Structures are given as C-alpha cells and as structure tokens.
Amino acid sequence: MNILEQICADKRIEIEAHKQEQSFAALEALVEETAARPDFVQALRSAPMGLIAEVKRRSPSAGAIREPFDSIAIARSYEAHGAQAISCLMDHKYFGGGADDFSAVRGAIELPMLYKEFVIDPWQIVHAKVMGASAVLLIVGVLPNSDLIAFMEQIRSLGLAALVEVHDREEMKRAIDCGADCIGINNRNLKTFVTSLETTVELAAMAPAAATLVSESGIKTPADVVFLKKIGAHAVLVGESLLRESDPGFAVKHLMSAL
C-alpha cells in the first residue's frame, strides 16, 4: 500500500467517526444558513496569474514545515500581499490541518478558500460548504469515474467549484471526460513524492481551451511562475516554498514579481 492509499484508508475511518458526531442530514440542514463566498475561479482569473497560497503545517515528505505556526497571521499576510485564494489543509494525521485551522482562517480573511482534502465521501463536500469554502479538491487518482462525476455535480449544486487534480495523462483524460473545467496539475508524484514542472508541460497540452489550469507543487521562483504562465497555466498553488520564508507574505510578492 502506497502513501496515498494509506491516507485514503485512514480517511474512511475518520469520516465514519465524523458522521457519528454530525450526521449528513444534520450537516445538510446548515447549508441554507451558510453565507455565500467569493467565486474561486473568477478570483484566479482576475490576475495575470492567479495564486492559491497554502496554509499547511506539515507533510509526509517534508515533515514540519514552519514552527511556530500561526495560521491566521500567515493567511492574513498572504491576503495583504496579493494572493487570489487560500488553500487550507483539512487532513490532520498526515498534514497537521483540520477544521480548527480552516475556521480560524475563514474568520480572518475575505479571499475564497479551497477545502484541501482527500475527498472520498459526500459528507466532506457538504462540510466544505458549511465551513465557508469556495472550492473543493477532488483527486482523480483516488476516485472512480462514477464518484468523480457525482462529486462534481454535488459541488456545483452547492455553488462551489471543483478543483480536479491530476498527476498523469490517464488521469487528465479521465478528468476531461468527466467534465472537469478547473483542473489542478500536481507536479508531485503522490506515490514517490518527486516533483517536476514537466508534468504541467505535458498535461497542459491536453487541456480543453476553456478550462482553468492550476499548476501545483514544486513552484519556487518567479521564473517558475513565468514559465508556467507561458505554457498555459492560469494559476499556481504554492505552499512549502512560501511557508519556509521568514515572511510568507513578502514571499508571495516576490514569487509573483516577474509577471
């Protein structure tokens, strides 16, 4: 079992525990009183190159990324220095995230937020809506087409965007065939955790003209951002390289400075 399979196996157990605490019906009842949030794709398209800046405490490959970690201060600094959206990790066991971080950030900023999670159950999508997300990550590599299509429909019915993440040509084809119109190309191989921007080069060439493309992982320099824009990406998702700087907000400004 690779790390992605292990994370999803643990996630199934976690979600069943959440359902015992708050049923799907109880969660769904909160949707009507949940305030509308800014449009995710519109925000990304509002800039020459959109930036989704990530709030992430740790990862299986990198370990602890930043200590001490102040999710509110980080998110506010991202917002103040020009990010178009914020990604917040929901997985606690492997990434140190969770509902507490998401809620804290949501209450502190106005930007659209991405519910960055290993989504395997409809409960999580309703939870994303109630938590104040504007978009939900769907990872093609962990979902059969039937679930991918159903989850995209559910996300759209709640007025959210689905960021559909792919890692290779087969997954890109599946995402397109299932109707994805906001596609995240992850430059990190989730089985080996090796990153290469060439993944975006290869997969961007397959994308429908109208799709919004987000390049994810391994983006470290202004030159990387310029390169990705030239090959067709509309936005980048960046976490670790920003979080390792003493001032993440200044790092945002520097990263996008060559556009």
Image: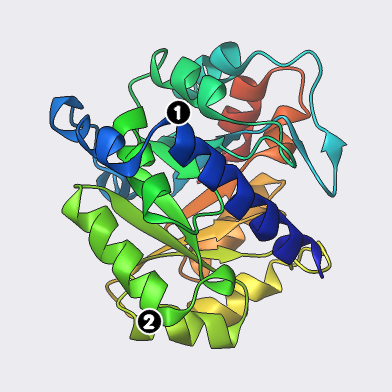
- Label 2 – label 1 distance at C-alpha: 30 Å
**Residue extending furthest toward the left:** 32
Tag 1 residue:
82
Residue at image position (51%, 27%) is 99
Q: In which quarter of the image is residue 63?
A: top right
Crowding at mark 2 (Cα within 10 Å: few <14, some 14-19, many 20+): some
Residue 113 pos. (x, y %): 40, 35
Q: Earlier in the sequence, mark 2 or mark 1?
A: 1
- Quick check: 43 above or below 30? below
Which is closer to the viewer, label 2 or label 1? 2
- Residue 167 is situated, as x and y percent measured from the top left of the image, at 62, 73
| Amino acid type, mark 1 | Gly
User: Residue 181's image quarter?
Assistant: bottom left
Residue nearest the viewer, comparing 142 with 213:
142
Q: Observer-nearest residue: 109 or 118? A: 118
SS label for mark 1: loop
